Image (tube, rainbow, N blue to C red):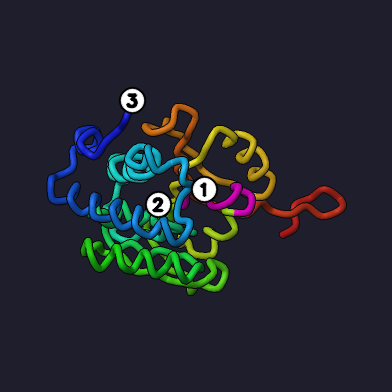
Amino acid sequence: MTFDPDDFARTLDVSRETLDRLKCYAALLEKWQARINLVANSTLPELWRRHFLDSAQLLPLVRATGAEPVETWLDLGSGAGFPGLVLAIMGAGEVHLAESDQRKGAFLRQVIRETGANAVVHTARIEALTPRRPDVITARALAPLDRLLPLAARHMRKESEIWLLKGQHVEEELTQASISWNMQLEEFASQSDPLGRILRIRGLTPCRKKTPSGNPRR
């Protein structure tokens, strides 16, 4: 069954103004897709479920679970802007989009100009980006957890949270990541993908390395 903009608006209870801005974003994405590969062509017929709903579902979850207001976000490997640019258009706060590809960065900036989104694009590698210390770090389809968590860790402060959109292999990724990282973890079901999971990670710290004797290294 097709999931269209009106279905999106009803599911997340967004205003007509916000929906119009997201429609502008969708139109620009389809226009630019002819020139650069922003998303898989096979997902375009399901754009509003596969990309917009998948991204937007984070906002009510973050607001419902957080004790403090979330004002700043950092989206790692933004690509076509999912989830960070969707969150910015929906009024999440100040969103920083980290995307090293210059052409994708140009696309993101055009969407920001035409929608008035509260977002800033950083066209730099995540490893080279000046640490942002946001309230929330997000990522979607960027890398497995054991490679993603070190990238996120350098941008965190003690109170920062990581919210990740993950697919069906998330348990394998968590098992591998737990070898090197301690974390407080919560999992939520995805509204857009029956096999998908949303991860909320707090208190991320590297595991203490062990000496050859088996004792933790201080």
Q: Give the amino acid type for the residue marked by disc 3 in the picture.
A: Met
Residue 72 locus on image (x, y percent)? 33, 61
| Circle number at residue 82 | 2
Residue 65 can be seen, yes or no: no
Q: Give the amino acid type for the residue marked by disc 1 in the picture.
A: Ala
- Outermost residue on the right side: it is 212
Along the line of sight, the residue nearer the viewer: 144 or 208: 144
Q: What secondary structure is marked by label 3? A: loop
The answer to which of marks 1 and 2 sits earlier in the sequence is 2
- How crowded pointer 1 is (Cα within 10 Å; few <14, some 14-19, many 20+) is rated as some
Along the line of sight, the residue nearer the viewer: 176 or 156: 176
- Outermost residue on the left side: it is 16
| Circle number at residue 141 | 1
Q: What secondary structure is marked by label 1? A: loop
Q: Which residue is mark 3?
A: 1
Q: Residue at x 38, y 44 (%)?
A: 51
Q: Which residues are magenta?
A: 139-147
Along the line of sight, the residue nearer the viewer: 69 or 128: 128
Residue 39 locus on image (x, y percent)? 45, 50
Question: Which quarter of the rendered picture does the N terminus lie within?
Answer: top left
Q: Magenta segment: does it hold 183? A: no
Question: Which quarter of the rendered picture does the C terminus lie within?
Answer: bottom right
